[in-house]
Amino acid sequence: MDFGRILILIPLILLSFVSSNDSHSIIRMRTDLSDSYAGVRKIRVDDSLYCDSWRFVIEANDAGKWSTVPKRCLEFVKEYMTGGRYTSDSEIVADYAVAFAKTVNVSTNRKDAWVFDIDETLLSNLPYYRDNEYGSEPFDEASFDLWVDSSVAPALPASLRLYNELRKLNFTIFLLTGRTENQRTSTIENMLFAGYSGWEKLFLRGASDLGKLATVYKSEKRREIESAGYTIHGNSGDQWSDLTGFAVATRSFKLPNPMYYIA
Ligand SMILES: *[C@@H]1O[C@H](CO)[C@@H](O)[C@H](O)[C@H]1NC(C)=O
Ligand SMILES: *[C@@H]1O[C@H](CO)[C@@H](O)[C@H](O)[C@H]1NC(C)=O
Ligand SMILES: *[C@@H]1O[C@H](CO)[C@@H](O)[C@H](O)[C@H]1NC(C)=O
């Protein structure tokens, strides 16, 4: 917006405040805010505003590394994850990904690739996090590994839709996860259980990948894919470390995840 338009807008905005009932209009704003979280009466208005801003900064990676959901945001994150917002946000991310995919001129040589992360991207670990305070407790690797071995994580519906759409468009699909090689069998079982099939290759962390930052490990694997002659058009992940580094995709699609952060 150019400066001239701002100069015209400012008096208009001021006028709209004056013509409505000033002190009342401010109170009404706050009422509307809590109404938009109707059903979660447990979230205080100031927590709901703070936590919405907190969610913005962690999703935009403005916060950098963070370890657990602030206690005051537990109810907010729970409501976000289970009350429809998470579903809606991920559906809209998928809509944009599908729209982009349709602009790609997919050739018949099978070299047009899309890379997917697994956890909180294709599979949802929400049943696990529901039993573990939605990320407001420190991560417990032992119990999470048991959950992974159970192979019953459901698909994130928006991602399953995107995945199937990409297959119809003849993209070659690569799975690139921070899970380790010893979780290969349970991961494949879980992917099939959730309704996925037809991927080209599943990358898990091998012995030489242990201890690497996710950004480095994932960039190296993407470079490997490119070296094999593929063009990575799209990349979907819930962590910035799924998407950034080198050998990045033409378009990266960040899915929401207010429960944990992986560097
Ligand atoms: C503002 O509120 C007062 C008291 O409630 C009322 O008398 C007045 O008409 C209102 N003004 C406007 C512009 O709505
Ligand atoms: C799509 O690719 C084909 C073959 O690679 C090429 O002939 C055609 O011009 C391309 N179309 C567009 C719109 O780029
Ligand atoms: C995908 O590939 C198959 C087999 O090569 C072809 O028959 C089909 O038309 C392709 N679909 C699209 C959307 O390009």
Image (cartoon, grey):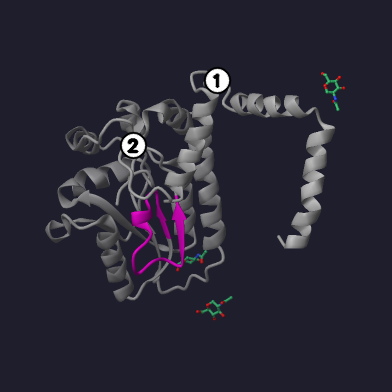
Residue 5 on the magenta segment: no
**Do callouts 2 and 1 mark residues in contact (Cβ within 8 Å)?**
no
Secondary structure of the residue carrying tag 2 is: loop
Q: Is residue 245 left or right of residue 38?
A: left
Q: Is mark 1 within 8 Å of ligand 1?
A: no
Q: Residues in magenta?
A: 235-254
Please, what is the three-letter code of the amino acid marked with disc 1? Answer: Gly
Secondary structure of the residue carrying tag 1 is: loop
Say if 54 sits above or below 103 in the image: above
Residue 1 figure quarter: bottom right
Task: Give the mark nearest the N terminus, 2 or 1.
Answer: 1
What is the distance, in whole Å, between disc 2 and disc 1 at their CAs?
A: 24 Å
Residue neighbourhood size for the residue with mark 1, other residues' Cα within 10 Å, grouped as few (<14), some (14–19), many (≥20): few
Which disc is residue 39 wearing? 1
- Disc 2: which residue: 125
| Rendering coords of residue 187 (x, y %) | 25, 45
Please, what is the three-letter code of the amino acid marked with disc 2? Answer: Asn
| Rendering coords of residue 47 (x, y %) | 49, 28
| Rendering coords of residue 188 (x, y %) | 26, 47
Residue neighbourhood size for the residue with mark 2, other residues' Cα within 10 Å, grouped as few (<14), some (14–19), many (≥20): some
Say if 23 sits above or below 177 in the image: above
In percent of the image, x 78 and y 42: which residue is there?
Answer: 14
Query: Foreground mark, 2 or 1?
Result: 1
Q: Is residue 137 left or right of residue 80?
A: left
| Rendering coords of residue 252 (x, y %) | 45, 60
Residue 228 in view (yes/no): no
